[in-house]
Image (cartoon, grey):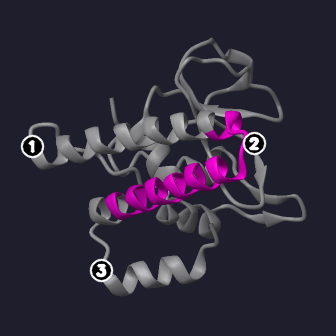
Amino acid sequence: VYPDSSSGVSLSNPESEEEGPKIIFPPYQDIPQFSYDPEGTYAVSQSLLSIRRNDPFLAGILNSMLGRFVITRTCPLTDRGYHISIAPIGKFPVYTPDFDNPDDKARHDRMGALVNEMLELHKHLSHATTDREKRIITQEIVSTDRQIDSLVYGLYGLTADEIAVVEETVCR
């Protein structure tokens, strides 16, 4: 289930958390990053918030350069980093795929595959023992990240000039 673009994203209340898949993130971050937790491994607390959706598609959008661009423009910057809270993140313009459109379904499925690939690459990186192995996996992570960015730019219909603004403004 996806909200329409006007409804944005809804966050979970930590007191009402149940176990299950979710997107997790700390409320203060220097560079906005969201982790997809498909197994529901992590507990939500005051220092870890969640978006209660089993949704690698949304995780990919939030972690993309465009996602970071929007978040750094809508969430206040404090001495602890960007404060990512219910009010600004709830207004995030989530792209709603039309599953009757084969192109939209294919983009949705591709995003899920890329996010799951990213999870696997990070697992492999944490187990890498040689510098060469770490370098190769890191290159694959960078490549996968670029593929996600490209997919998100296409979803939102950004022009080359708009992409240049996003990429010049946002640090990885």
Give the number of the disc on residue 102. Answer: 1
Question: Can residue 21 be spotted in the picture?
Answer: yes
State the residue lying farthest toward the right. 79
Amino acid type shown at disc 2: Pro
**Magenta residues (range):** 125-151
Secondary element at tag 3: loop
Residue at x 51% of width, y 65% of height: 65
In the foreground, 136 or 153: 136
Amino acid type shown at disc 1: Pro
Residue at x 57% of width, y 62% of height: 68
| Marks 3 and 1 in Cβ contact (< 8 Å) | no
The x and y percentages for residue 160 are 32, 83
In the foreground, 126 or 114: 126
Secondary element at tag 1: helix
Side (left or right) of 116 relative to 128: left
Q: Return the disc, 3 or 2, that comes first in the chain's sequence.
A: 2
In the foreground, 145 or 18: 145
The crowding category of the residue bearing disc 2, from other C-alpha atoms within 10 Å (few below 14, some 14 to 19, many at least 20), is many
Residue, disc 2 = 26
Residue, disc 3 = 159
